[in-house]
Image (tube, grey):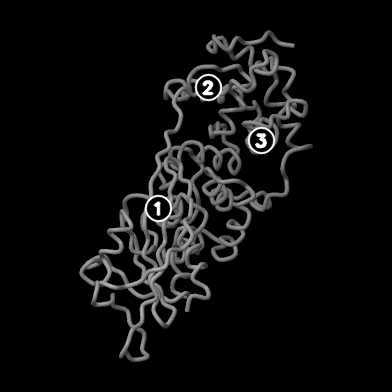
């Protein structure tokens, strides 16, 4: 067994030591025998499906991504199909997947690939990261898996695997230390470029299946014998980050107005803040502000408070349903905001939308959940 690398001295990782550890060869062999081979995006390791899956998998579990990937591939089988689609259709399919800027960047990236690269994803990392929504790790995944380029991915799973394996105990909250670990990741890459696709999938599989954050399966790890964290009983101490995400608590109040034709008032949100560019209901900072926006005497029905977790925020969403009766109107579809409270929402683009319309646009999951609560109210 190679001499253990002290976690307090991560710079002692030398290229000679890494070569002796045989990390890449072991991982390639393990992936072929025990890695994941049934994921839908593994059936065709072409850049388009690999890119699509990598974007979807950012901060999202594989179990969730499977269904969304299949829907996107069925509707947009090629990057050209995706580039030609209307943004509303793209975002409607993305609805519920979260981190909605990924969906907008996905659409923008497809357009750039078609316009600037003749519909073919570039093979060089510098070109890949110039595209919307493709960072160094996603770009490295595409380059290594699809083009066998010697590029090292560095997502959360890989950072955890390498921190533990190498005993790297420096603070990964600091960019300099992230770059240093990335340099070690490059040194660990297999010598043979033809092994790059399997190696990249292997290190992702190891982080997802074995070297997980809490339920660590060290007894199943192919590199347990040369893992510093395992040898020194420091598995749960690594990776080390001094800065934790600070979560704030926030309450928001939505007015969910439905008219007697089962149309619900909504509008596209601005391009700033959470759920940018998605469709949602009129929003207020307090219940009092919401009630003050309505005509005197209007009764609203409180719906179940919905909890929604974001990366930096815990939201409590209070929905208030108002069944708006349009007396004296014709049977034709009315699009305008009701006049009695038009001034409160003036200039914000609200209109009556039927359920088919809501289904065609991007909407956050809480919006979809509240729409489902409206069943039976009319």
Quadrant occupied by the N terminus: top right
**Which residue corresponds to mark 2?**
240
Q: Name the residue at 71% across, 26% down.
A: 25
Choose between 68 and 53: the one closer to the eye: 68
Residue furthest toward the front?
297
Q: Secondary structure at mark 3?
A: helix
On screen, residue 290 versus residue 64, left or right, reads left
Residue furthest toward the left?
343
Q: Looking at the picture, how far across and down is residue 19, in whole percent?
A: 66, 17
Q: Name the residue at 60% across, 16% down.
A: 167
Q: Based on the displayed image, in which of its 4 quarters is residue 267 positioned?
A: bottom left
Choose between 80 and 263: the one closer to the eye: 263
Number of the front mark, 3 or 2? 2
Q: Looking at the picture, how far across and down is residue 304, in whole percent?
A: 49, 60
Q: Which mark is residue 116?
A: 1
Number of the front mark, 2 or 1? 2
Q: Which mark is residue 220?
A: none
Choose between 276 and 338: the one closer to the eye: 338
Q: Which mark is residue 194?
A: 3
């Amino acid at each position: 067994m190679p001499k253990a690398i002290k976690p307090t001295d991560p710079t002692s990782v030398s290229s000679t030591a890494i070569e002796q550890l045989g990390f890449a060869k072991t991982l390639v062999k393990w992936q072929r025998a025990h890695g994941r081979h049934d994921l839908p995006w593994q059936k065709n390791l072409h850049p388009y499906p690999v890119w699509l899956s990598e974007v979807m998998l950012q901060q999202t579990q594989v179990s969730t991504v499977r269904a969304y990937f299949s829907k996107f591939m069925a509707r947009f089988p090629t990057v050209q199909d995706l580039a030609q689609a209307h943004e509303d259709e793209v975002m409607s399919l993305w609805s519920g997947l979260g981190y909605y800027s990924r969906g907008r960047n996905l659409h923008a990236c497809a357009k750039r690939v078609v316009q600037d690269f003749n519909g073919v994803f570039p093979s060089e990392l510098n070109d890949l990261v110039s595209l919307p929504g493709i960072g160094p790790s996603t770009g490295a995944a595409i380059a290594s898996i699809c083009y066998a380029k010697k590029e090292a991915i560095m997502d959360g799973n890989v950072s955890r695997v390498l921190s533990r394996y190498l005993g790297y105990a420096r603070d990964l909250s600091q960019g300099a230390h992230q770059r240093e670990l990335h340099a070690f990741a490059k040194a660990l890459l297999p010598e043979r470029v033809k092994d790059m696709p399997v190696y990249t999938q292997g290190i992702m599989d190891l982080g997802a299946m074995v070297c997980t954050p809490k339920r660590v399966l060290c007894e199943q790890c192919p590199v347990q014998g040369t893992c510093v964290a395992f040898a020194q009983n420091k598995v749960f101490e690594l990776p080390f980050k001094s800065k934790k995400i600070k979560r704030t608590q926030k309450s928001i109040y939505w007015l969910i107005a439905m008219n007697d034709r089962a149309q619900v008032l909504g509008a596209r949100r601005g391009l700033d803040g959470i759920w940018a560019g998605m469709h949602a209901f009129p929003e207020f900072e307090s219940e009092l502000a919401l009630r003050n926006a309505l005509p005197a005497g209007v009764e609203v029905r409180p719906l179940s408070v919905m909890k929604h977790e974001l990366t930096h925020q815990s939201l409590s969403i209070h929905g208030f349903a108002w069944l708006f009766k349009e007396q004296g109107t014709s049977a034709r579809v009315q699009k305008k905001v009701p006049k009695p409270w038009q001034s409160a929402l003036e200039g914000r683009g609200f209109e009556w939308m039927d359920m088919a319309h809501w289904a065609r646009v991007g909407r956050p999951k809480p919006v979809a959940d509240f729409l489902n609560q409206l069943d039976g109210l009319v």
